[in-house]
Amino acid sequence: MTDYPQLELLIGGEAIGAAGRETIDVLDPASGDVIAALPAATAADLDAALDSVSKGFKSWRKTSADEREAVLRKGAALIRERAKEIGAAITLEQGKPFKEAVGETIYCAMLLEFYAGECKRLYGRTLVRPDGQRAEVRYEPVGPVAGFSAWNFPALNVMRKVGGPLAAGCSVIVKPSEETPAGGLGIVKALHDAGVPGEVLQCVFGVPSDISEHLLASPVIRKVTFTGSTAVGKHLAKLAAEDLKRTTMELGGHGPVLIFNDADIDKALDTMSANKFRNAGQVCVSPTRFLVEEDVFERFRDGFVERAKAIKVGNGMDGDTQMGPMASQRGPDGIQAKVADALDKGAKLEAGGNRIGNQGFFHEPTVLSEVPLDAEIMNEEPFGPVALINPMKGEAAMVEEANRLPYGLAAYAWTQDAGRRMRMASDIEAGMVAINNGSVSAADAPFGGVKWSGSGLEDGAEGVTACLVSKTVHESA
Ligand code: NAD
């Protein structure tokens, strides 16, 4: 496998290979074959990383904004230069089409460029005081950060863990997913090559719960940032609370899509079907519950089914593939169980429903309609290529269903009515709402959820301020 890079731990500026350490197999989801052995950090490695990240913080926090900006911009340039190389590694370990993997990598560079600019915008504030007195609010980096990220965006999730902290002046230990290590390592190495010191940014792997428990038990770590399931997010938030560490939690969602009878239905179909099956549905902001006004329900359902059936599923390295395999065996297993439960409870299978072949982790683009509210899939994030399309009676019922779940990450609404667009913006409980639009993410836009979808924000100016603490200085002449 010539395109897949060497896997290492990066601790205190040293690259540590597999020799003398336990290893974790990395699989190609298109074949199920083992493609690499990932070294696992020992307890001593983690202690060394903690020691280094503490030293790294002392120096990085003193760098000037100009210096940090220049290093981050150089990192972004290197990521752009290496986008095809990093993208190929992502496709091999995670399965998404190569074009999407390269796009993900370029997006990392865009985010880093935005963060670089923010280095010079961490303004403080001067309070009104009489002559002879001064009171100043200053913003300072929170301290060393521990970041844990998921496998669905191997590079972008890692960039979201490190970009904001580095811009703010924090040092970071990041643990990308063991299932998809190379994308994140590619980002970390580009930053090192751009001049981020090895003590300031480190990368470890191992048994996830052992690593987080070890790092979070240390008073050195002052902030925890995590992307993954709500269950693990709650667990990490509890560990963080023991030491009152700051947290950013980017957790699951169950994206409602409200399709009103006055919507541009063809545009909604083209946009949302492509969005649904992007990355085989393994996206936290994936549209999931399609709530369609009953008079346009059949047209929308049939149009969606037609588009789902036309999707070309295959190996992500093949140029004409539109949807790759799911990232691991858990993917098709979970979808199969949830689809069976939904059909058992009375849902209708409109498209797909099966695994594809007996090699790798492929699953058909799947559409269920008229899915009862007590089906597991209407309540738990499917995180896979399944759309649920239900007929609904009017706006109030649609908003009520959109807000029924404890999740609130991304929501989508399609309507031409200006008044209704305003109501959607205010009435839907979500961190991000897209109206007549399929995208909820941009480098300058805060990304994050409410309720069980998480707390704290990444991206945008908020992604940096989330890594700052304020200090007020009261001074007399
Ligand atoms: P998970 O939460 O168990 O794992 C997600 C990531 O967190 C993995 O990379 C894992 O290595 C890491 N992790 C797990 N336990 C950890 C711990 N104790 N400490 C530190 N890191 C830990 O999720 P999963 O089993 O991979 O997927 C289950 C569900 O989670 C999905 O179906 C989906 O609903 C949700 N999920 C959400 C996102 C997201 O983007 N928000 C990403 C992945 C999974």
Image: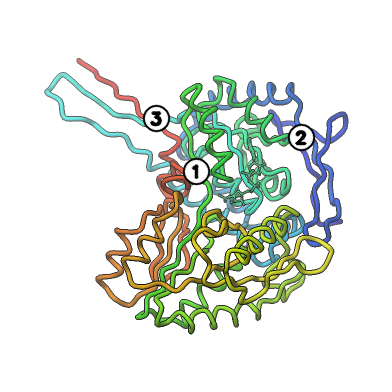
The residue furthest top is 477
The residue to which callout 1 is attached is 69
Disc 2, SS: strand
Looking at the rendering, in which quadrant would you find the C terminus?
top left
Identify the amino acid type marked 3. Val
Determine whether the residue tagged by mark 1 lies in a helix, strand or loop.
helix
Can residue 263 be spotted in the picture?
yes
Q: Is residue 162 in view?
A: no
Q: Nearer the viewer, residue 466 or 356?
A: 356
Q: From the viewer's perspective, is the residue at label 3 or at label 2 nearer? A: 3
- Mark 3 or 1, nearer chain start: 1
Q: Earlier in the sequence, mark 2 or mark 1?
A: 2
Q: Nearer the viewer, mark 2 or mark 1?
A: 2
Query: Circle 1: is it few (<14), some (14-19), or many (20+) Cα within 10 Å?
Result: many
Tell me: is circle 1 under 8 Å from ligand 1: no
Q: Quadrant of residue 317?
A: bottom right
Identify the residue under disc 2. 15
Amino acid type indicated by mark 2: Ala
Task: Mark 3 and mark 1 in contact? Answer it, CB < 8 Å.
Answer: no
Name the residue tied to disc 3.
469
210 vs 440, nearest the viewer: 210
How many numbered marks does the figure carry? 3
Neighbourhood count class around disc 3 (C-alpha, 10 Å): few under 14, some 14–19, many 20 upward = some
For ligand 1, tell me if the residue under mark 3 lies within 8 Å: no
The residue at label 2 has a CB less than 8 Å from ligand 1: no
Quadrant housing the N terminus:
bottom right
Give the alpha-carbon distance from disc 3 to disc 1, as whole Å. Answer: 20 Å
445 left or right of 174 in image: left
Residue 71 is situated, as x and y percent measured from the top left of the image, at 56, 42
Residue plotted at (41% across, 29% down): 140
